[in-house]
Amino acid sequence: MRFIAKLGVDPVARADPTLLQAMGLPGGGIVRLGDTHVQVVPGDVPGPTVLLVGPRTMANAGLSPGDGVEVTRALLPIAHRVVVADADGLDARRLGRALQGRPVTVGDVAVVRAPRGDEIDEWRLRIVEVEPAPAAVVGPGTAVHETSRQDPPIVPHEGAPPGEPPTTAEALVAGLETEREVLAGWLALLTSPDRLPATWGLPAVAGVLLEGPAGCGRSELVDAAAADVGVRVDEVLLDVVHRPERLLSLLERAVRETKPPAVLYVDHADAVAGTDAPFRTQAAAIFRWFLDAVAERPRFACVVGTASVAGLDPAVADSPLLPRRLVVPPPDTRRRRLLFEAALARVPHRRIDFERLAVRTAGFSATDIAAVVLDATARTTAANEPVTQELLDRALEDIPPSLGSAMLGEVPSYGFERVADLDVVKQRLRETIIWPLTDPDRFRRLGITAPKGLLLWGPPGTGKTFVVRALAHESGAAFFPVKGAELLDKWVGESERAVRELFARAKAVAPSILFLDEIDALAPVRGRSTNSVTDSVVAALLTELDGVADRGDVFVIGATNRKDLVDPALLRPGRLETHLRLGLPPAEARAAFLAISDVPLTDDVDRADLVDATEGYSFADLAGLLREAALHALRRDPEAIEVTSDDVAAALEVFADRRGVSPPRRSPR
Ligand SMILES: Nc1ncnc2c1ncn2[C@@H]1O[C@H](COP(=O)(O)OP(=O)(O)O)[C@@H](O)[C@H]1O
Ligand SMILES: [Mg+2]
């Protein structure tokens, strides 16, 4: 929610009680404010949208008095450890006590007061490190110490699996065990001394097509597989080839000069044989020749690499000489963790939370991860100064994921602050989705696993879709929303494949949230529908759900107006096991909605009356009512900037009419 920052006193901020209530913080709580976090409490403020902030907090947040600022609720873990600078004369115990209960964010300056001798003195502490996240709350168990005295040890690597950290090349192929095995199998067959394919009367084969985004380990996979079977690899890169003659001479020479047994890795085929490559037709012809030449030559195979097979000329993409296609997916959480460990293995660094880095880097390619580590290293001021979590975090903010937002799904721009009421739902979503992402230890400590699936159900317009979209924003995870009916329409006859691809995409950039809205259309009770296609869609959905339940990292949320129509197999434990009902909003919820609405109502609109008059309205109805009222205001005066009680009365009439003719509302069972 947006506030105007005005000058108050440190360290606690104050805001209007009603607005805090609307944000789901009736008694106050911790919020994110610009670059920092602060405790906010309900208090007397000069205007409903004013946030009173002390000068120190202003500076930490990067604000000046009068600035507008977005305030969002923050979920901070309890700090294990906080390192501060400039605490001369304060011992660890007094430090801890002085910061007790406060949110601290790396980069903040915190002013604390504590006794020095007989007097109370003031310290301006710089917050240098916070664990387990760059922002956390100081609790009774938090170890607070000063940098100069207890410099945390410089560790070569930590959190790596037992043994040596992987090298970059190893890390790049970690998690690709299946692909590596398949590729090694093909290479072994094609380079075997006995010319097995020919002996067995199999059709001639040139090699394998290898598809995967740039910078994700395609060539490392070829190297690893070839090493597994003990053959040499030569590499030809086509991204620098600008003329057909050059392409021909390169490939010709490669075939002529490489001595079998060997593998020729031809990468960036899309650069010359891609759909929009300048001399694509000639390139296709040259490739046809090349593949024939390779297939003819004994103990010789090629691997043709491309970012996407879909963008490749059919002469290459569908060539019978390249019968097998392998896909190198973008790095998932596990691979990203290994990549960070590998990249930092030889860089001096402080304690790093690798799990957190992996979770925060959905959409990062392997090269992006290397760039993050380089960037963090470049930010150290002195040579040999260790890389810290903070530097890595800052580098993360500056380096965009090259696997792009399309891969990441779309993340909405509003969070829970725009969602009125629904406290229980928001809390459950937080527990099941945000906690496992930000603090997986909570569950591990108690020996439980977080549920992987959840169903929201209830009458239309009660905020099911709305709250999940806000959740996607809050969690920062990649978000894949689909409407049941859309998936069926767009992919007639291919819905099962669509389901599988959707899950594959979500898995590839995990952690991610897959949102199956209006799931009753996608997964109706089997046997009951006349359409046998949907039965197999339900079956595909069950398989995929069970798959992600094992692996974790992909949270599946379903929503429906008609829970009774959803196939019950989908709703069992291990699948969409938690069911949350959203009902029509009671009076307080309607009041909360009015309080956070952006529609400016004049003071003569009696909020309490309006709440009474809208008994039985859903949130969608309320939103519609205010829209209607605002339109009425604009009809009255095109320059209107406020909505009066007359406008509201007119809108209520329109709605009363509409509701009069519509059948009485019933909530589904
Ligand atoms: N809790 C809420 N707070 C504020 N606005 C809401 C809330 N719930 C719903 N709305 C409004 O109502 C509209 C319809 O809600 P939606 O989530 O699509 O309903 P459902 O999916 O349950 O049918 C939303 O676009 C939003 O404008
Ligand atoms: Mg909906």
Image: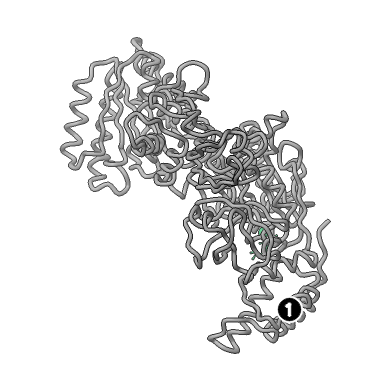
Q: What is the quadrant of the N terminus in the image?
A: bottom right
Disc 1 on helix, strand or loop? helix
Left or right placement of residue 199 versus residue 121 in this view: left
The correct choice, above or below, for 586 with respect to 602 in the image is above
In depth, the one of 597 and 580 nearer the eye is: 597
- Where's residue 193, x and y in %? 33, 10
Residue 582 position by quadrant: bottom right
In depth, the one of 668 and 643 nearer the eye is: 643
Confirm whether residue 504 shows in the render: no
Left or right placement of residue 267 versus residue 571 in this view: left
In depth, the one of 570 and 404 nearer the eye is: 404
In depth, the one of 109 and 69 nearer the eye is: 109
- Where's residue 389, x and y in %? 47, 36
Tell me the kind of residue under disc 1. Answer: Phe
Count of number-bearing discs: 1
Confirm whether residue 125 shows in the render: yes
The correct choice, above or below, for 122 with respect to 663 in the image is above
Q: Residue furthest top?
A: 194
Q: Name the residue tied to disc 1.
A: 655
Q: Residue at x 56, y 43 (%)?
A: 135
Residue 339 position by quadrant: top left
Q: What is the quadrant of the C terminus in the image?
A: bottom right
The correct choice, above or below, for 610 with respect to 666 in the image is below
The correct choice, above or below, for 546 with respect to 398 in the image is above
